[in-house]
C-alpha cells in the first residue's frame, strides 16, 4: 500500500510533549530511516526524533519488521519454534523471546497487526 504524502498517521512519543500521543494538531515529519529500515520521525513541537515502532512490540527488536512478520506467519501456521529456526535461520531463543514478548503484549500486538498487516498476507 503506497502512502502518498499528506497526513502521517503517527503520534509523538515524547511524554513531555504537549502533543504526546495526540493526533489532532501535531506536526510530525518523516526524517530518514534507521539502520534496520524503520522509519524515523521528528516532532516539530518538542524537537524530538523517534522511531515509528516505539510503543509497539517491534521497538528495540533487532529483527526487521519483515523478519518478525515472517516468523509470525510460521507461528500462525502452528509450526514449532525449532522448525521456524530451520526455516528462518534465527536462533530458537530469539524466536522464543519474540513469542513471549508478543504474548505479554498480546492486545497491543493485535492492534499493531490489524493496523499494519494486509488482510491476505497472513
Ligand atoms: Zn512532540
Image: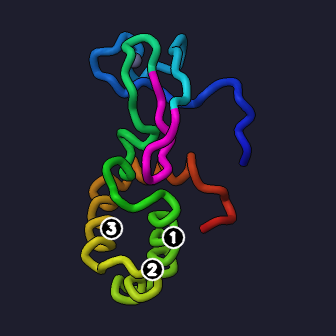
Q: Position of residue 16 (x, y in %)?
A: 28, 16
Residue extent of the magenta highlight = 32-42
Q: Can residue 107 be seen at all in this image of the molecule?
A: no
Mark 1, residue position: 70
Name the secondary structure under disc 2: helix
Give the alpha-carbon distance from disc 2 to disc 3, as whole Å: 15 Å
Identity of the residue drawn at 32% across and 65% down = 98
On the image, which quarter does residue 56 sit in? top left
Q: Is residue 26 above or below residue 53?
A: above
Q: Position of residue 33 (x, y in %)?
A: 49, 41
Looking at the image, which is closer to me, 44 or 84? Answer: 44
Q: Position of residue 102 (x, y in %)?
A: 34, 59
Identity of the residue drawn at 38% across and 83% down = 85
Name the secondary structure under disc 3: helix
The disc, 1 or 3, on the residue closer to the chain's N-terminal end is 1
- Given this view, does label 2 or label 3 mark the residue nearer the observer? 2
Mark 3, residue position: 99
Question: Dot 3: within a 10 Å radius of its alpha carbon, few (fewer than 14), some, or many (20 or more) residues?
Answer: some
Q: Is residue 28 magenta?
A: no
Quadrant containing ligand 1: top left
Horizontally, residue 92 falls left or right of residue 37, namely: left
Give the alpha-carbon distance from disc 1 to disc 3, as whole Å: 13 Å
Q: Can residue 41 be seen at all in this image of the molecule?
A: yes
Q: Is residue 43 above or below residue 107?
A: above
Picture disc at residue 88: 2
Amino acid at each position: 500500500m503506497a502512502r502518498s504524502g499528506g497526513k502521517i498517521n503517527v503520534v509523538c512519543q515524547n511524554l513531555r510533549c504537549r502533543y504526546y500521543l495526540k493526533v489532532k494538531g501535531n506536526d510530525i515529519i518523516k526524517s530518514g530511516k534507521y539502520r534496520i529500515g524503520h522509519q524515523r520521525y521528528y516532532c516539530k513541537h518538542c524537537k524530538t526524533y523517534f522511531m515509528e515502532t516505539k510503543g509497539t512490540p517491534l521497538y528495540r527488536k533487532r529483527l526487521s519488521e519483515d523478519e518478525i512478520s515472517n516468523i509470525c506467519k510460521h507461528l500462525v501456521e502452528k509450526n514449532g519454534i525449532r522448525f521456524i529456526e530451520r526455516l528462518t535461520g534465527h536462533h530458537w531463543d530469539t524466536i522464543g523471546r519474540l513469542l513471549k514478548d508478543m504474548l505479554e503484549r498480546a492486545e497491543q500486538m493485535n492492534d499493531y497487526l490489524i493496523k499494519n498487516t494486509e488482510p491476505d498476507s497472513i
